Image (cartoon, grey):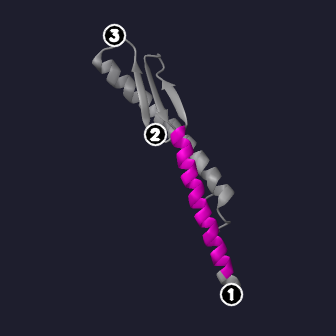
């Protein structure tokens, strides 16, 4: 009877540790910066891997419509990188830190 209680307490401890690992991951991602450039090199967006935009650089002489199109395209490209990296690292963190729970997708 008490063995099951000990198992539950152990699992709760692992889950709390897991929450701390995810908090650490969030801090790491927010501190990691990268730059994505449009295909023609006219727009550069610098952001954290937690999707905080840090800077946008535009080439001189661009028209309003061109700026809008390239900023949207480049920002979406950067956000796709952020999403893929965050998902991969979250899965890795989960696999390394969660107890084996049947039915979990990782």
| Magenta stretch encompasses residue 52 | no
The reply, left or right, for residue 26 in relation to residue 73 is right
Which-is-in-front pick, marks 1 and 3? Answer: 1
Q: Answer above or below: position of 99 versus 55.
A: below
Residue 51, disc: 2
Between 14 and 63, the one lying in front of the other is 14
Report the Cα–Cα distance between label 2 and label 3. Answer: 28 Å
Q: Could you tell me which residue is drawn at 61 percent across and 62 percent down?
A: 17
Can I make out residue 14 in this image? yes
Between 86 and 3, the one lying in front of the other is 3
Bounds of the magenta segment: 6-31
- Label 2 residue SS: loop
Residue linked to disc 3: 61
Report the Cα–Cα distance between label 1 and label 3. Answer: 74 Å
| Magenta stretch encompasses residue 26 | yes
Q: Answer above or below: position of 88 versus 10.
A: above
| Quarter of the image with the C terminus in it | bottom right
- Label 3 residue SS: loop
Can I make out residue 104 in this image? no
Q: Which is nearer the N-term, disc 1 or disc 2?
A: 1
**Residue 57 occupies quadrant:** top left
**Residue 18 occupies quadrant:** bottom right
Residue linked to disc 1: 2
Q: Which is nearer the N-term, disc 1 or disc 3?
A: 1
């Amino acid at each position: 009877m008490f063995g099951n209680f000990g198992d539950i307490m152990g699992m709760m401890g692992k889950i709390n540790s897991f929450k701390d690992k995810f908090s650490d991951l969030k801090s790491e991602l927010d501190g990691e910066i990268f730059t994505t450039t449009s295909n023609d090199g006219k727009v550069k967006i610098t952001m954290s891997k937690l999707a905080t935009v840090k800077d946008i650089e535009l080439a001189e002489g661009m028209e309003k419509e061109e700026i809008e199109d390239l900023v949207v395209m480049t920002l979406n490209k950067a956000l796709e990188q952020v999403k893929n990296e965050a998902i991969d690292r979250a899965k890795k963190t989960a696999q390394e830190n969660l107890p084996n729970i049947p039915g979990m997708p990782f």
